[in-house]
Amino acid sequence: MIDFNEVVKIYQTEEVETIVLNEISLKINQGEFTSIMGPSDCGKSTLLNILGLIDSPTRGDYNFNGKVVNQLTERQKADARKKNIGFVFQNFNLIDELSVFDNVELPLIYTAVYQM
């Protein structure tokens, strides 16, 4: 289901290059539960953003459900996220005008899991 092979993520400015993920390899099969732990600023959020198809690796291979992520269009990534990935953001990407219930309900309506 998830297969990382030597994934690297580098953030670069004109003055500084920061290697956030350095040749990470992992495999998570369907039905497995996995935890990611580590100290602050060790790359957990970056790893999750790549796993969740929100960000892309600088180098390395990422296969999700048998598909090479680097070859997917943004639309295909969005469809894969919608159908396969549940994401709870650290910074609570909620819509201010909606209640908590409505914020939870909205993505379920978009995916036709729940109907009003």
Image: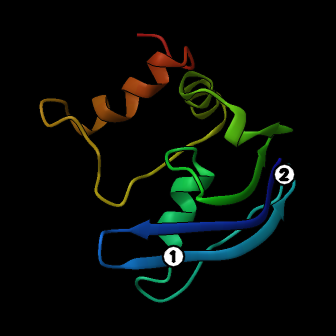
**Mark 1 or mark 2: which is in front?**
1
Say what secondary structure mark 2 lies in.
loop
Mark 1 to mark 2: distance in Å? Answer: 28 Å
Residue furthest bottom in the image = 39
Q: Amino acid at mark 1?
A: Val
According to the image, label 1 marks what residue?
20
Neighbor class of circle 1 (other Cα within 10 Å; few <14, some 14-19, many 20+) is some
Pick the front one: 8 or 39: 8
Measured from the top left, where is residue 27 in percent x and y?
84, 62
Task: Residue at 50% x, 69% y: name it.
Answer: 10
Say which of 21 and 36 sits in front: 21
Q: Residue at x 66, y 72 (%)?
A: 35
Image quarter for residue 71?
top right
In the picture of the structure, the residue carrying the numbered disc 2 is 31
Seen in the picture, residue 36 relative to 111 is either above or below; the reply is below
Crowdedness of circle 2 by 10 Å Cα count: few (<14), some, many (20+)? few
**Looking at the image, is 57 positioned above or below residue 21?**
above
State the residue lying farthest toward the top.
116
Residue 53 image point, x, y percent: 57, 44
Residue 70: image x %, image y %? 68, 41
Is residue 65 toward the left or the right of residue 18 in the image?
right
Q: Is residue 88 above or below residue 103?
A: below
Q: Residue at x 37, y 24 (%)?
A: 106
On screen, residue 70 versus residue 9, left or right, reads right
| Residue 21 position in % (x across, y down) | 59, 74
Q: Residue at x 14, y 37 (%)?
A: 96
The image quadrant of residue 57 is bottom right
Check disc 2 and give the amino acid type. Gly
